Image: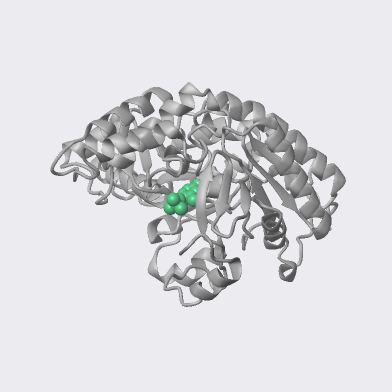
Amino acid sequence: MSKTQTADQITEARRESHLFYLSSLRRPLIDRAEGIYMWTQDGRRFIDGSSGPMVANIGHSNRNVLDAMKRQMDRATFAYRLHFENEPAEELARELAKKLPEGMDRIFFVSGGSEATESCIKLARQWAVATGQASRWKVITRFPSYHGGTLGSLSITGDDALAETFEPMMRVMPTVPAPTAWRDRDNLSMEQRGVRYADMLEEKILAEGPESVVAFIMEPIGGAATAALVAPDSYYARTREICDHYGILLIHDEVMCGAGRTGKFLGGDHWNCKPDIVALSKGLGSGYAPLGALAAPMRLVQPLLASGGFQHGHTYAGNPLACAAGLAVLGEMDRLDLIANAAAMGDVLMDGLKGLAKRFPFIADVRGKGLLTGAEMVADPETLRPIEQGEKATQRLLDLAYERGLIIYGRRVKGGVDGDNFMVAPPMIVASEQVGEIISIIGDSLEVLA
Ligand code: PLP
C-alpha cells in the first residue's frame, strides 16, 4: 500500500481484506510509531495513551532494544528449546529473578498473557498431582476479572460476555467477588471491607471443599475487567493467610500490572506480596516481541522435575529473539529509571483524572497505581446505577478520544458489576506535558459525552 493513497482509497482497497477480528471494527493502517506516538498511513498522529492494551511500556521504537534485536537476528532468531538452550533466555531469566520477590527464581517462558496464566494453572495442577494431592484441581478466581482468551485461561476469567458461548467446552471455575470495596454502602472502614472480601475467599474454599481447591488467582491491580481496581490494603495480607491456611497456591496475574508500570516492578510489590506463582507478559516484551513468563520458587518446581518435568510447552516459548528483546527492555527500564518515572508521572496523571471527576460527576471513581489508572462511569453517582446498555458509554468515549488523536482503553463487562470503565496507561517514558495533553483530550471527549 503506497503512502500517497488517501484515507478513502485505503478504505476502498481494504474492503476485501481477508482479516477478521471484531464484526465492524475497521481502523487505519499503522505506518510507524516512536516514543508515545503512532502515525497512520493516512497521515494522522495518535498519542498512545494506553500503550496499546498496556503493552508498549518503554515506548515505541526504542533504539537500544531494536539494536539488541538486530544483533540477535544476525545470529539466530529461533532455536527450539528441546534442541538447544540460548543465552538471551538464560540471561533474561537471571535478570527477571533479581527483580522478583525473593525465591521466585524459576522462570518458564511463553509467548503471551493467556499462555502465561494457563501455564500457571497447569503448573499448579501438576504440582498437586506430583505431591500426592490429586484431588485438588479447582482454581478459584474473581468476578469480574480477565485472565485471557484461550479456553483454559477463559475458564478462570470472570466475564459472562466472553465466556458464555464457550462454557460447554470448558469447566468454569468457582468465583468470588472482586474487591470493589469503594462501591459498598455500609458502615465498615475500607480496611474492614478488605478483610470481608478476602473472607469471601475462605467461605468459597469451605463451600467447594478445601481438598478440591488447588489455587486462587487474582490480578493484584485490576486490568481489563475492573479498570485498575485496587483492593484495600488489608485484602492482600489476608488472602495470603487464607491460602496458606488451606494449602492453596496464590497465583498473581501480573500480565497487565507487572513489569514496572505501576511504579514498582510488580503490582503486588506495593503490598510486599509473596505469591506462589506469578504470570507476566505485555510490558515484558513491551511490544517488541511476543513474550510472557511465569515465575515460581524451586519448592514448587522441584516435584515436577522429579517426576519427569513440566508437561507443558509452546513451540515459540523462550525463543532467542523474543528473549533478547525482553532483556533489552529490562535494560532500558533500568538505564532510563522508568519505574521511578512511572511513579512520578502516575501522580500527575492521577491528579488530572481527579480533576476530571470533579468536572464530570458521572465519573464515580478514579483509581490505580503509577501509570495504570482507570475510571468508572455511572448513570447516577449516588445510587451507582449503571449507564443503560444501549448508550455504550465506554465505546463512545474511546471513539471520541480516537477522533481527537488519543488512544485510551476500555471494555464494558457483563455480569457482577456491569461497569463502564476506561483506562489511561501511557508508556513509562511519558513526560508531564504529555500527560497534560492526554487529560485535556479526555476532558474534551467527556464534554461531548456529557
Ligand atoms: N491476564 C491479564 C491480567 C490480562 O490483562 C491479559 C490481557 O489483557 C491476559 C491475561 C491475556 O493476555 P494475552 O492477551 O496476551 O493473551
Q: From where the camera sits, is residue 157 visible?
A: yes
Q: Is residue 150 above or below residue 261?
A: below
Looking at the image, residue 369 sits to the left or right of residue 73; the answer is right
* Residue 27 in the figure: left or right of residue 277: right
Q: Residue 47 versus residue 122: which sits nearer the camera? A: 47
Residue 316 x, y percent position in the rendering: 27, 49
Task: Pick the residue in front: 245 or 355.
Answer: 355
Q: Residue drawn at (23%, 36%), measured in percent from left and top? A: 303
Q: Quadrant of the N terminus?
A: bottom left
Q: Residue furthest front?
A: 4
Q: Position of residue 117 (x, y in %)?
A: 40, 47
Q: How many marks?
A: 0
* Residue occupying the point 63% across, 39% down: 230
Q: Is residue 190 visible?
A: no
Vertical comparison of 381 with 269: above or below:
below
Q: Is residue 4 left or right of residue 302?
A: right
Q: Position of residue 284 (x, y in %)?
A: 43, 38
Viewer-nearest residue: 56 or 3: 3
Q: How is the image coloured?
A: one colour
* Residue at (36% x, 34% y) in the render: 67
Give the position of the C terminus as an image quadrant. Answer: bottom right
In the foreground, 256 or 426? 426
Residue with the most extreme bottom position: 16
* Residue 187 sits in quarter: top right
Residue 154, given in percent of the width and then of the height, sits at: 45, 58
Could you say which quadrant of the image residue 89 lies in? top left
Q: Residue at x 74, y 42 (%)?
A: 439
